[in-house]
Amino acid sequence: MALLQCQSLPGIGCSGIALARARVQQCLAAASHAPLLPPLLRANGGRTGRSPASVKAGNAIGFGRRGRRDLRVVAEAAAAKVTPVSPGGVSISDVLWPSAGAFLAMAALGKLDQVVAYKGVSLTIAPLGAVCCVLFSAPNSPAAKKYNMFVAQIGCAALGVLALSLFGPGWLARAAALSACIAFMTITGATHPPAASLPLLFIDGPKFHNLQFWYALFPGAAGCVVLCLIQEVVVYLKKNFKF
């Protein structure tokens, strides 16, 4: 039968007819997923001069175009949500003001060292260097909150004095003081990592032993007062003088 059909259509081979049938079947399959009538035809009551097969084929073509348009819209929306990172994301002022604040802080503590030098103690201690980094480079972090800073500084320093008086200088006092500091900051919710080094500084620093429990206020908490004042200046400069 197929051979007779091929012979009855001169100029068209069997392969061409098979290909045409396959394309019609694809159009009909796509049309089954699309609306039977486009909006314009529904408005006219569904009346049209075309055959049902041509209507289905037109719906399939329209569905394909709408699908491609929808995909393009989704791709453009997804691309719009991607925020490109500029190579110069950090401005000069973001670098200059915190760095200048750290320089001024250490200079001020150094000047205060000259005032208290006769007592053999110092304000320029390593924990305050870590506090400078927190206050000036991450002023909005939990460790930079005033409550966390002062509660942790005072409490951890006092725990260092207590550990030394109970266990004497050595590894046991250091271990007990550090574990007590972590427990203290967890219970009070005052997380301030630089304060955890104050007990170790006291246990290993004989020049601070004469302070006894005054070490809870000096040099840690006293130094933080100076640093907080300088931090306010740095934050103001970063907000109002950007370049």
Image (tube, rainbow, N blue to C red):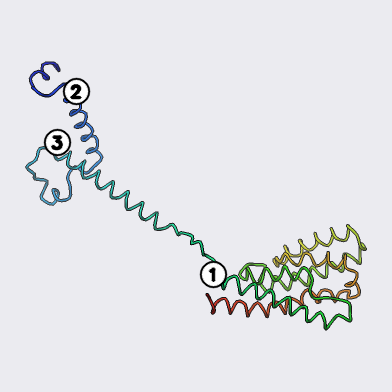
Nearest-to-viewer mark from 3 and 2: 2
Q: Is residue 184 above or below residue 69?
A: below
At mark 3, the secondary structure is helix
**Which image quadrant for residue 171?**
bottom right
- At horizontal 48% and vertical 62% (from top left) the residue drawn is 86
Q: Position of residue 44 (x, y in %)?
A: 10, 50
**Which image quadrant for residue 93?**
bottom right
Nearest-to-viewer mark from 1 and 2: 1
**Pick the front one: 215 or 99:** 99
- At horizontal 78% and vertical 81% (from top left) the residue drawn is 111
Marks 1 and 2, how far apart at CA: 69 Å
**Pick the front one: 46 or 111:** 111
Choose the circle earlier in sequence order: 3 or 1.
Answer: 3
Choose the circle earlier in sequence order: 1 or 2.
Answer: 2
- Mark 1 surroundings: few (<14), some (14-19) or many (≥20) residues within 10 A: few
- At horizontal 85% and vertical 60% (from top left) the residue drawn is 174
Q: Which amino acid, mark 3?
A: Ala
Q: Which amino acid, mark 1?
A: Ser
At mark 1, the secondary structure is loop
Q: Which amino acid, mark 2?
A: Ser
Q: Which residue is mark 1?
A: 91
Quarter the N terminus occupies: top left
- At horizontal 54% and vertical 66% (from top left) the residue drawn is 90
Choose the circle earlier in sequence order: 3 or 2.
Answer: 2
3 and 2 marks in contact (CB < 8 Å):
no
Looking at the image, the residue that sits furthest to the bottom is: 115
Q: Position of residue 181 (x, y in %)?
A: 78, 63
Q: Which residue is mark 2?
A: 15
- Mark 2 surroundings: few (<14), some (14-19) or many (≥20) residues within 10 A: few
**Pick the front one: 243 or 171:** 243
238 left or right, relative to 207: left
Q: Which residue is mark 3?
A: 53
